[in-house]
Image (cartoon, rainbow, N blue to C red):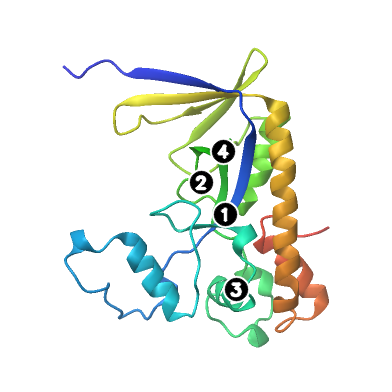
Amino acid sequence: MPPPPTFETVTLSGDLRLVPVVEFEPGPYGRLDDPRPEGPDEDVPMECYWEHNLAKAGIRLEPLLPGTWLVPVSRLTDPHALRQLLRVQLESKDPAKMVDPFEHVSPMAGGQVLFEGEHVVLTPRCCGDLRNLDRWEAAARGRFDGFWIGHPQVFASTEEQWLLLREEEPDRNGVFRAWRLSPLMLARAALAARKAQEDFARRLVPLLSEWFPPEVAHPLASVFSGLGEPE
């Protein structure tokens, strides 16, 4: 008989940060027929493969966390890296031939990493994207319906004065984890994250303006950055 599940709840009382990140999936940046760097699989860490493929596109980036493909938007300042990122986001189509570019645009994959001080609490899950910021903002306001940062799912609810985040599935040790945090502190963290994504959108505008007129480049940058299409 398997052991009974273990539940662990941690109260986050330190400073909270939400760091917006973009996921650089390495495949599109290297040639499709590119092999992984030479050596037995166990001797070639995934981060080497990641760096190898990005280097094919002339991109040098440092991920937020070792062994991941997550890069903070604050580090995305090099125009060449941003052009390559936009090329992949536009699926290598010719922007000049797009009748409606918004049919080809969605928020960039990634999301927000929740930190307590320098400790990583939660990272974006599979299928998360920069648009998930509005789910963090809603949770800080006590609105939990549709809380989503990717799957496996994390659920949000209240517990007395706390916001409670709870994982749907156990970790590799069979532990179901949950976190209590201050809604006010999360709201402050989300506000800083929104500013970082707005700054990121502003950096995208001049590059998108190389392909699109200004009235299109600005809303495209907003959508890519997870801020939604301006009304």
The amino acid pointed to by label 1 is: Val
Mark 4 or mark 3: which is in front?
A: 4
**Image coordinates for residue 103, horizontal then vertical, percent:** 64, 69
Query: For numbered disc 4, what is the local secondary structure?
Result: strand
Q: Let me know if residue 161 appears in the view.
A: yes
Mark 2 in CB contact with mark 1 (< 8 angstroms): yes
Q: Quadrant of the N terminus?
A: top left
**At 62% from the left edge and 73% from the top edge, which residue is drawn?**
78
The correct choice, above or below, for 141 with respect to 224 in the image is above
The amino acid pointed to by label 4 is: Phe
Mark 4 or mark 1: which is in front?
A: 4
Separation of residues labelled 4 and 3 (CA atoms): 28 Å
Circle 3 crowding by C-alpha within 10 Å: few under 14, some 14–19, many from 20: some
Query: For numbered disc 1, what is the local secondary structure?
Result: strand
Q: Earlier in the sequence, mark 4 or mark 2?
A: 4
Separation of residues labelled 4 and 2 (CA atoms): 12 Å
The amino acid pointed to by label 2 is: Pro
Separation of residues labelled 1 and 3 (CA atoms): 15 Å
Mark 4 in CB contact with mark 3 (< 8 angstroms): no
Circle 2 residue = 124
Circle 4 residue = 115
